Image (cartoon, rainbow, N blue to C red):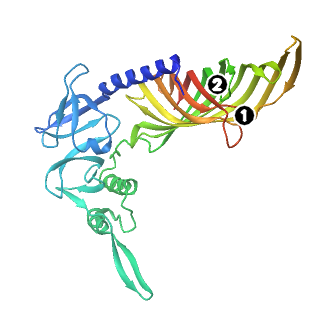
Amino acid sequence: MTTGPAGRALIALTLLLCYFASSAQDYRPGFRVGIDGDTVKGLVRYATAKRSEKRCLFKPSKGAVKTVYSPADIQGYGIFGDRYYETIADPKDGAGMFARVLSSGQLGLLLAHHQFFLRRDTVELLPPPVKIKIAVANGQAFRTEKPYAGVLNIALSDCSIRADELPYSEKELTVAVDQYNRCKDPNFQSMQRRKAFQIGMSAFTSYIYSDMSLKFDQVSIDASTFLAYGIGVDLYSPRIFDKLSLALDVTYGKSFYQGLISGPSSGYYLREDVFMNFTSIRLAAAVRYSFLDASHTPYLKFGFADYAVIKDDIRILTEKELAEGMVITSKSSGGFGVKNPKGIYVGLGYQHSVNKKIKCFVEGRYENLEGYIGTAIQSFSDMRNYNATFGLRIN
C-alpha cells in the first residue's frame, strides 16, 4: 500500500519530533546533597526507578551543563514532590547505591534493587522472604519464612508494633515504620507519595481525511473529510513512571464516500456512481509515551483502532451504454458487503497545562486500516485516515 503526501509528511514530522525530544531530557526541580552535607537546589533528570538507583543527572539551572553523580559522589538527591534517594552500601559487594527513601524519622525505611533496608544507627538489610520445602504426610509442601519480620519486631518493639503478618511490600512496610515514627514523634510527617494510579478524562474533536480504496479493477473512490467527536480515558501510575500511560478513547463520526466504477462489459459500457454513507463508533487503545513533564510535553502514541458500523447506506446509480448508443439508467441500494474496519494507528501530539487540573492538546494521527467494504472474514477495501485532533484533558 502506498503512503500519500499527508502520510509521508506525518511520518517525517514524527521522526523529527522524536529526534528533538530524545535530545531534550526531562529535568525537574530538585536538589542534591553533597558529601559535606551541603544541599544544592537545581534541576534533576526524571528517570525510571532502575536508572535512578545508579546515577543522578543534575543541573544547577536550566541552561547549565549537566553533571552526572554516582553514589560515591553525593549523599543523596531528590525531586521535589516526588522521589528522594539516599546513598547506602550494597550488601552484596559494599559498593554505594542510591536507595529510595520511603520513611524518614527516628527509624528510616529505604528501597533499592527490590529489597528493603532499615536505617537506625546504621543501615541494615531487611532479608526478603524465602520458601522452604518441607515434607508432609502426602508428599512435599512449601513454607514461607519471613526473616525480615524478626528484624522489624526488634526495631518496633518499644512501640508495641508487630510485623509477623506484614507482607514484604512497599505499602505495608511503609505504614508500619511511619506508625513507629509517629509513636516516637507526634509531629512526624509521612513522606509525600505520589498516587499509585491516576485516571484522566479527555474530550476532543477530530478533523479526518479518509482515503478508502477498493480492491477491484476500474474502481476509484474520492476521499472523505468529516468531523468526529470523542471522549477518552488515560490510565497511568505517577508513583512508578508517569511518562507511560494507557490511552483509551471512543469516537463518533459520519463519513461519506463517492466512487466511480466504469469500463466495458459484455455488450455495453458500464458506468456506476456509488454513494456510501457510514455512521460508526471508533474504539481505540494505545500506549502513550510523554517525553517531558506532563505540564508541557510532546508525546507519541501507538495503538489499535476498531470501528463499529452502526448505520450504513449505499446507493448506486447505474448507466449502461449499449452499442447502438442507447443509455439505460437504473438506481439500486446495497450491492456491497459492509464490515467493521480495524487496524493500527500512530499518534503524535503536544500537551500544555491550562491550570493544575486542565490541559489542552493537539494531536495528529495516521491510521492504517481495513476499509468498510468486505465480509466478516475478508476485506475488499483498504483505508488510510489522517486525523487532526484538538481537545482538553482533565486529571
Which residue does the image show at 38% across and 75% down from the upper left? 143
Q: Is residue 295 visible?
A: no
Mark 1 Cα within 10 Å, few/some/many (few <14, many 20+)? some
Determine the secondary structure under disc 2: strand
Which one is in front, 260 or 235?
A: 260
Q: Quadrant of residue 169?
A: bottom left
Distance of mark 1 from mark 2, alpha carbons? 15 Å
Q: Is residue 300 above or below residue 52?
A: above
Instruction: Specify the amino acid type for callout 2.
Output: Met
- Judge left or right: residue 160 versus residue 336: left
Q: Furthest-left residue in view?
A: 36
Check the picture and name the quadrant holding the N terminus. top right
Residue 84 position, x and y percent, is 28, 41
Describe residue 308's horizontal placement relative to residue 189 as left or right.
right
What SS does tag 1 mark? strand
Q: Where is residue 282 shown, x and y percent of the image?
A: 64, 33
The residue to which callout 2 is attached is: 212
- Dot 2, how many residues are within 10 Å of its Cα: few (below 14), some (14-19), or many (20+)? many
Q: In the displayed structure, would residue 133 be above or below residue 242?
A: below
> How many labels sit on residues?
2
Q: Are marks 1 and 2 in contact (CB under 8 Å)?
A: no
Residue 394: x and y in percent read 54, 29
Q: Nearer the viewer, mark 1 or mark 2?
A: 2
> Looking at the image, which is closer to me, 334 or 342?
334
Q: Residue at x 39, y 57 (%)?
A: 172
Image quadrant assignment for residue 94: bottom left
Q: Could you tell me the amino acid type at mark 1?
A: Val
Q: Which residue is mark 1?
A: 309
Question: Vertically, is 175 above or below 194?
Answer: below
Identify the residue shown where x is 53% and y is 19%: 4
Question: Is 304 positioned to the left or the right of 186 in the image?
Answer: right
Residue depicted at x 89% and y 16%: 328
